[in-house]
Amino acid sequence: PIVVNVNAPVTFTGASQGVVTMREWDVNGDGIIDSTTTQQSFEHIFTKGGTYSPRYRAIGPAGVAEVTKSAFIVVKTPPVAAFTFDPATPRSGAAPLSVRLIDASTQEPTSWAWTVFRDNGNGVFDADTQVDSSTQQNPTFAFSTGGDFHVRLVSANPVGSSAPKVEPVFIRTIRVDFASDISGGILTVGQPS
């Protein structure tokens, strides 16, 4: 197959024998004619990723000749960022907590930009709220303090970058302490004072 990037021009050239008075192109194989021309070549821009089977039809005084090239064009797009939390590590819990993330982005990303932000309550992630970052495909982040955090991933490939994917992580600070009173042979455990 021929591999092209989304939104890049592709030139189709019909090779026909004999006199050709009209050429028809169904470039994505959906049965709808995308171009009718007397010219031997025409240009098309694919706006969606996928695998396409173009059909070319040459019409002339001697009749109609047609050819379809099955799965001939593969159109690549930027990734769609996605990730999961490693089931072996929790997504929420008590600090300190390590959380491993698994990249699940589509369209064969070649780079990753992970950022961990503290939730400041307004949904805006900026340098003031950033607490960690990584360019690994499947990073592990260590949370040493409690709070509400968000993990953000932008993945990229040679075609472009994804929109950000953001998921929350909840880290709680748990204080363990107790007060005891032993009187009359009974142990009473209660909240610390």
Image (cartoon, grey):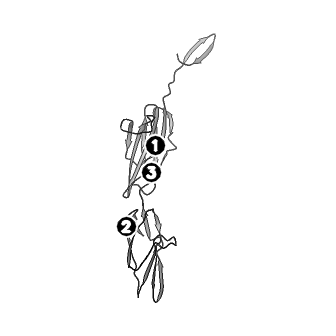
Q: Amino acid at mark 3?
A: Ala
Residue at 43% across, 69% down: 73
Query: Which picture quadrant has residue 21?
Result: bottom left
Q: CA distance from mark 1 to mark 2?
A: 41 Å
Q: Residue 65, percent across and down?
A: 47, 83
Between discs 3 and 2, the one toward the N terminus: 2
Above or below for 81 versus 183: below
Q: Which residue is mark 1?
A: 100
Q: Is residue 43 left or right of residue 71?
A: left
- Badge 2 marks a residue whose secondary structure is strand
Q: Which mark is residue 9?
A: 2
- Report the number of discs: 3
Query: Which picture quadrant has residue 125?
Result: top left
Residue at 48% across, 40% down: 168
Task: Give neighbour class at mark 3: few <14, some 14-19, many 20+ (Cα, 10 Å).
Answer: many
Which residue ends up furthest to the top in the rendered image?
A: 184
- Badge 1 marks a residue whose secondary structure is strand
Q: Which residue is mark 3?
A: 81
- Badge 3 marks a residue whose secondary structure is loop
Q: Amino acid at mark 1?
A: Arg
Q: CA distance from mark 3 to mark 2?
A: 26 Å
Of 134 and 45, nearer the camera is: 45
Above or below for 156 versus 36: above
